[in-house]
Image (tube, grey):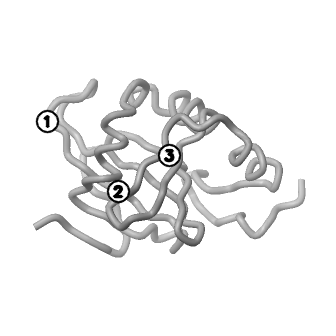
Amino acid sequence: MRRTEFEQANPYGMINLTSKEVECSFMSKIVFEIVSKFGKRVALTQGKYDHICKRHPEVSGEIDEMKETLSSPQIIRRSTYDEKVWLFYRFFEETSVTEKYLMVAMRIFNDEGLILTSYFTDKVKMGEEIWREK
């Protein structure tokens, strides 16, 4: 299948979109939209939410936590694999998998963003730090 300009090299397989997948992401039902820490409107589509829940079932039902992580993150990093992907982190003392950070990755298109993935993690991953809560 022919790849578009959205194709990105990524060892985790997080960002490897065909033109059909990009089209489906924009046409999919919106689960939520929120304004992120830096005023960018971010959307989570139903298709992407289903994909996230399939790969990371512990995140299923964590919509409010995803919103909180995007609007009030503790750390924001730029992906080492794609400069247009920002990683938002917020630590939660109580989750379905003990105390962990919730990471929400979003790809930036001008002043908007699409959520690519989300999962709980023990630590903040590598990447250039963009912002940190004081």
Rounded to the nearest angstrom, the CA distance separating label 3 from label 2 is: 11 Å
Instruction: Tell me the residue at 58%/30% (across/down).
Output: 50
Relative placement, left or right, of 53 versus 78 is right
Quarter where residue 67 is shown: top left
**Residue 28 in the image: above or below residue 80:** above
Mark 1: secondary structure: loop
Which amino acid, by three-letter code, is at mark 3?
Thr
Q: 58 or 86: which is nearer to us?
A: 86
Locate residue 103 relative to residue 25 in the image: left or right.
left
Q: Is residue 34 left or right of residue 74?
A: right
Q: Secondary structure at mark 3?
A: strand
Q: Position of residue 88 (x, y in %)?
A: 35, 56
Q: In the rendered image, which residue does mark 1 sit on?
A: 93
Secondary element at tag 2:
strand
What residue type is disc 1 on? Answer: Glu
Residue shown at 17% from the left, 35% from the top: 99
Q: Amino acid at mark 2?
A: Phe
Query: Could you tell me how far apart the alpha carbons at marks 1 and 3 are, in whole angstroms?
Result: 21 Å
Q: Residue at position x 31%, y 37% from top?
A: 65
In the picture, residue 74 is in which quadrant? bottom left
| Residue linked to disc 2 | 88
Nearer the observer, 34 or 85: 34
Q: Are marks 1 and 2 in contact (CB under 8 Å)?
A: no
Alpha carbons under labels 1 and 2: distance apart: 17 Å
Residue 133, image x, y percentages: 16, 64
Residue at (29, 44) in percent of width and height? 68
Q: Earlier in the sequence, mark 3 or mark 2?
A: 2
Query: Mark on residue 117?
Result: 3
Residue 31, percent from left and from top: 53, 34
How crowded pointer 3 is (Cα within 10 Å; few <14, some 14-19, many 20+) is rated as many
N-terminal of the two: label 1 or label 3?
Answer: 1
